[in-house]
Amino acid sequence: MTSLPQNNELDNQQNESLIFHPKNIILFLTLAGLTMLFLSLSFAYVYTRTLSKLPPLQLPWLFYVNTLVLLASSYTLWQSKKAYLEDRTDRYQQTLYITITLSFLFLILQGIAWYSLFNQNIMIQTDNSAGYLYVISGLHFFHVVAGLPFLIYFSIEAKKYMIEPVSVLVYFSDPHKRLNLRLISIYWHFLDILWVYLMVFFVINKMIA
C-alpha cells in the first residue's frame, strides 16, 4: 500500500530534476534568443520598408503550402511523443518517419519557393524588402536543418532497440531519452509557431501597404 506513494514521490523528484536539467536551460535560453532575433528582424523590416517607402513582396504560394507541411510535422511529432509515453513501438516509429519526411518536404519546397523568386528577378540584393525576406526565411530554414539530425537520431535509435521486449522496455523507461524527446518536441513546435508568426507578419505587412 505504501509503495505507490513512494513511487509517485520518486517520479516527481525525477521530473523536477529533469526540469532544471542543463539541457532544458540551454534550450529555453536558445529559444529566448531566437525569439529576440526574429522580433528584431521583424521590427527592422517594418522600419526599413517604411523609411524607404518600398512596396511589400508577393510571397510565393509555396510559402503557404509550407505552413501546412510544418503544422503537419508538428502534429506527427506530437503523436510520436504520445506513442512513446504509451509504449506503442510501431506507432512511435511510424510517426517519427512521417515527421522526418515532412521536414525534408518543407526544405525542398522552400528551395523551390526561393527559385521561383529568382525567376521573378527578385534577388537578395534587389531591395531591402527582398533582402529581409531571404534572411528571415533563410534563418528559419537553417534552424529546421539543425533540428533534423536529432529526429533522424531518434529514428535510428528506435529501429536499433525496438527488436526484443527487454530492449524495448529499457528504451521506453530511459528518463534521458524521454527528456531528449521532450526537448526536440519543444524546439520543433517553436519553429512551427515561429513560421506561422512570420507568415502572418508578412501577410499583414502586405495588407497595410
Image (spheres, rainbow, N blue to C red):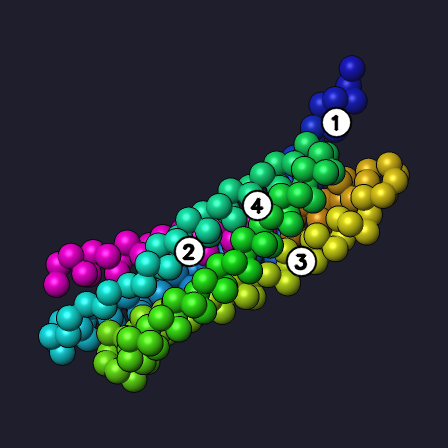
Q: Does label 3 or label 1 sit earlier along the sequence?
A: 1
- Amino acid type assigned to the residue bearing label 4 in the image: Leu
The spot of residue 195 in percent (x, y) is 39, 57
Q: Which residue is mark 2?
A: 66
Tell me the mark number nearer the camera, choosing from 2 and 1. Answer: 2
In space, the residues marked 4 and 3 are separated at their CA atoms by 12 Å
- Amino acid type assigned to the residue bearing label 3 in the image: Ile
In space, the residues marked 4 and 1 are separated at their CA atoms by 32 Å
In space, the residues marked 3 and 1 are separated at their CA atoms by 37 Å
Tag 4–tag 1 contact (CB < 8 Å): no
As helix, strand or loop, the secondary structure at mark 1 comes to helix
As helix, strand or loop, the secondary structure at mark 4 comes to helix
Q: Does label 3 or label 2 sit earlier along the sequence?
A: 2
Q: Which mark is residue 6?
A: 1
Q: Which residue is mark 3?
A: 152
Query: Dividing the image into 4 quarters, which one contains the C terminus?
Result: bottom left
Tell me the mark number nearer the camera, choosing from 4 and 2. Answer: 2
The segment highlighted magenta reads: 181-209
As helix, strand or loop, the secondary structure at mark 2 comes to helix
Which corner quadrant of the image does residue 1 belong to? top right
Q: Few, some or many C-alpha atoms within 10 Å of disc 2 (few <14, some 14-19, many ≥20)?
A: many
Tag 4–tag 2 contact (CB < 8 Å): no
Q: Which mark is residue 207?
A: none
